[in-house]
Image (cartoon, grey):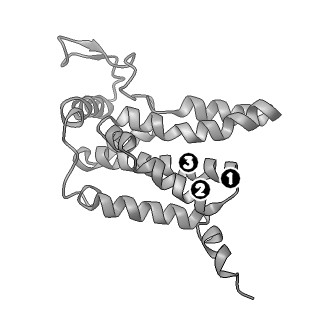
Amino acid sequence: MSEPNETRPLIFFTPLRFGIFLALLIFATFPQVILGVETFVARDFGFFAYPLAHFQRECFWRGELPFWNPYNNCGVPFLAQWNTMPLYPPSLIYLTLPLEWSLSFFCLLHLWFAGFGMYFLARRWTGNNFAAAFAGVAFAFNGFTLNLLMWPSHMATFAWMPWVVLAAKPAWREGGRRMIWAALFGGSRGG
């Protein structure tokens, strides 16, 4: 027996389908970046984020922990700086893959992660897959979020926000293992 027409939009956007749909939207918006033909370079991405990632990558391949960056402002702390991400595990994406492509891909992957997280958060709040899909797309493709693409550390931090909110309420109400998950999500953000 088939579903009535009025309920089909509600059940169409399952988590898997929404994840694929969001990935396709991101690909349709940034195909040149994902395919490696172009990279982000405008504003702070090219002047600030890329040089930081390049320095971190050099240190990584030399087997050094980047405590100090001698190339900025006659030397500045790197490991202690709030937006460099030297200890953020997903940074391995741009540390091990070609930097010209992987730093932009890192940002777009976090854009997908942000929208996917908002899907689950809205789904919990509304119980409606279509509303959750709408919220996930709106969260990923609003002006503020797209502006954050020029700062990989900000994009990574912002991408964790719906996941932290999603984990916080059960942790607060139930405690136990839920507290551990909420702490891991809260501590995992990129910045």
Residue assigned mark 1: 126
Amino acid type at circle 2 is Ala
In the rendered view, would you say 80 is above or below 105?
Answer: above
State the SS at label 3.
helix
Quarter where residue 41 is shown: top left
In the rendered view, would you say 120 is above or below 189?
Answer: below
How packed mark 3 is, by other alpha carbons closer than 10 Å (few <14, some 14-19, many 20 or more), is many
Q: Nearer the viewer, residue 51 or 126?
A: 126
Upstream in the sequence, badge 1 or badge 3?
3
Residue appearing at x 70%, y 86% in the figure:
2
Left-right relation of 186 to 71: right
Position of the N terminus by quadrant:
bottom right
State the SS at label 1.
helix
x, y percent for residue 139: 47, 47
Q: Nearer the viewer, residue 111 or 8?
A: 8
Upstream in the sequence, badge 1 or badge 2?
1
Quarter where residue 17 is shown: bottom right
Tags 1 and 3 touching, CB below 8 Å: no
The residues tagged by marks 2 and 3 sit, at their Cα atoms, a distance apart of 7 Å
The residues tagged by marks 1 and 2 sit, at their Cα atoms, a distance apart of 7 Å
Tags 1 and 2 touching, CB below 8 Å: yes
Q: Nearer the viewer, residue 155 or 68?
A: 155
Residue appearing at x 33%, y 50% in the figure:
105
Residue assigned mark 2: 132
